[in-house]
Image: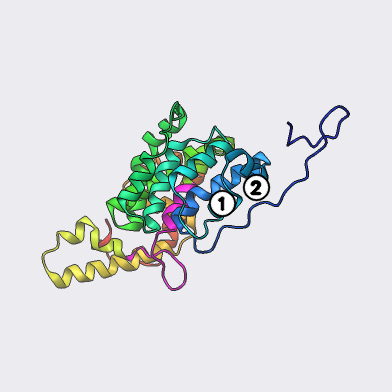
Amino acid sequence: MTPHNVSGQPGEDPPSRRGRPPGPICDTAGAAHRTWLEPVRARLTATGLTLDELVGLSGYSKTRISELLRGTDYYPGWGITSSVVRVLDRNIPLTPLRRLWSVAAAEAGKDRDWIISGINDAPPPTGEVQPVAHRGLTQAMGPPYTAYARAFLQSDERARLVVTETFDILWLTWNEATASPDTPRHAWKLLRSRVMARTPRREDGRPDLRAAAFSTVAQAGIPALTERLAHIDALARFFDTIAGLPEQNMDVLILRYLCGIAPEAVPGILGLSPALTHTLDHHARGALEQLSPRPDTQE
């Protein structure tokens, strides 16, 4: 059987009549649910399989698979999720997918017992090896990615969760990441998108960095309450100005001055050239001079 033959050459099976693809993801699907569902749907599109063909290969009903692929009606158990994904493409790594599925299950209101039971009832992933390059990227970028996420989310736990999510998505879509012109840049843009999706926003849509003013080392060491509040107010306005810069300029400043990353390390984190990073830093600091912070607020 050659369901994907569309060449029409003599001696070959005629092209199959393509079925309808699954409908779009339901609006009620949560952000964490979409995190793993979108790559799975993209892989389905890449294989060329129709929904009817996936039904025939998986043994599940068309209704259940359609609900799984659209994120409708119910959050799918790990058993059907892993089975359908394995039929779809045996090269999809289940280890990161299972972690992403677990986070989304909690977001969907499933309790810990339901999640653990679903995982235990399905065969565990076997023979999966984390790509060496992915492991190296995880080890090198874990600390700066976490520092960047913490600057926006103001929580160590939330920062670690979003960085873990980023690395799991990268592993799940590693072929796409390595096929990009610049893998570090691809990884950074993914991390940034996951952070921004969880960052509080101002009325004008800018990320709200003002809360960072309450967690600086300098203000914590000021004993007088009035002076401390004035210091916090100045820093809040300063961080608010940073949030109004173009995103690349903002990222350079946050990594360098809020996260304390060495200037020579910033280009590799952002996936940009040293010359461009230096230019972004220079222009960003020039724009911030309009704020003219008091000397005792510069940290």
Amino acid at dot 1 = Leu
Q: Which mark is residue 84?
A: none
- Along the line of sight, which residue is nearer the eye, 134 or 233? 134
- Along the line of sight, which residue is nearer the eye, 149 or 122? 122
Query: Crowding near pointer 2: few (<14 within 10 Å), some, many (20+)?
Result: some
Which residue shows up at 44% across the image and 58% down it?
197
Query: Crowding near pointer 1: few (<14 within 10 Å), some, many (20+)?
Result: many
Please report whichever mark, 2 or 1, sits nearer to the chain's N-terminal start.
2
Q: Which residues are magenta?
A: 189-210
Percent across and percent down for residue 215 are: 24, 59
Q: Which residue is mark 2?
A: 51
Q: Is residue 5 left or right of residue 184?
A: right
Say whether marks 2 and 1 touch (CB < 8 Å): yes
Could you say which quadrant of the image residue 154 lies in? Answer: bottom left
14 shown above or below 159:
above
Q: Is residue 137 visible?
A: yes
Percent across and percent down for residue 58 are: 58, 40
Q: Is residue 256 visible?
A: no
Which residue shows up at 38% across the image and 57% down it?
107
Q: Label 1, secondary structure: give it.
A: helix
Magenta-drawn stretch contains 281: no
